[in-house]
Image (tube, rainbow, N blue to C red):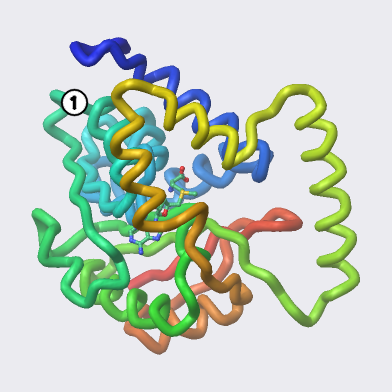
Amino acid sequence: MTTSTGTDWAAWQESWDRQQEWYMPDREERFRIMVEALVGTAPRVLDLACGTGSITARLLARFPEATSTGVDLDPALLAIARGTFEGDDRVSFVTADLKDPEWRATLPYDSYDAVLTATALHWLHSEPLAALYGQVAELVRDGGVFMNADHMIDESTPRINAAEHARRHARMDQAKRDGALDWAEWWQLAAQDPVLAEPTARRFEIYGEHADGDTPSAAWHARVLKEKGFGEARAVWCSPSDTLLLGLK
Ligand SMILES: C[S@@+](CC[C@H](N)C(=O)[O-])C[C@H]1O[C@@H](n2cnc3c(N)ncnc32)[C@H](O)[C@@H]1O
């Protein structure tokens, strides 16, 4: 939908999805499994490191009675998220740095049925991520869920990892020759947009190109989630490169 700013938010969502799919061809399948694994049809959800609100969009398409809070630090992606969901009372967005110990103070609720996140927590190193898991455990109600879809690397399988990396990059190289946009090229487009140029400049001041982080194994994520207060945790889906980890409170 094009709004009063003249910005076609749906087109930005579309190009964001295509750019992310260049890295993760199974991205939509990950979202589908994540949303289907929810408890109930009207959950209160926290879309953690929401970016443009990709999870929120899939959640509301599947469960129109759900509500969602999106939290992120990137002003440009949040501008796309806010533009997309403008006027939708089910959705709100807040700006916060998940490494700030007080980030939960920005949220409109102190408890959620589900906290969902995708392709984001590898921007954090393991130590701050473990601290974040402790905070997330306090936000999820008993019987509620946390789900993290991300790159989780098992260092005990180096030959499999190398083969997967080579296969994935061969596909990406071909898609690039066919015109796919990568991360840097997508941000160059955002920097040229009259509405997104200013928040894009701010996001580069915050992050640079991309924040550094770690990609610990699914076993690490499951262990730390249990240490931090989840009753059970394990992978519920995986592809050769990615895992969807579910923690049940
Ligand atoms: C690759 S995007 C994924 C966004 C969305 N979940 C999706 O799948 O399309 C990663 C997101 O994590 C956010 N992020 C990374 N570190 C963060 C932090 N410390 N605090 C808040 N958000 C963070 C980034 O701003 C970015 O929006």
Left or right: 69, with 58 as reference point: left
Identify whether 65 is placed above or below 84.
below
Question: Considering depth in this image, is 230 or 47 the residue closer to the camera?
Answer: 47
Query: Which residue sits at x=65%, y=44%?
Result: 24
Residue at (41% x, 55% y) in the render? 117
Which quadrant: the N terminus?
top left
Residue visible at 45% across and 51% down? 37
In the rendered view, tell whether residue 26 sits above or below residue 2: below
At mark 1, the secondary structure is loop
- Horizontal relation, residue 180 to residue 163: left or right: left
In the image, 23: left or right of 201? right
| Mark 1 burial class by Cα count in 10 Å: few <14, some 14-19, many 20+ | few
Disc 1, ligand 1: is the CB inside 8 Å? no
- Asked which quadrant contains residue 132, the reply is bottom left
**In the image, is 236 to the left or to the right of 50?**
right
Residue 84 drawn at (x, y percent): 29, 26
According to the image, label 1 marks what residue? 86
At label 1, the amino acid type is Glu
The relative height of residue 98 versus residue 34 in the rendered view (above or below) is below
Quadrant location of the C terminus in the rendered image: bottom left
The percent position of residue 177, horizontal first and vertical second, equals 81, 27
Q: Position of residue 98 (x, y in %)?
A: 30, 66
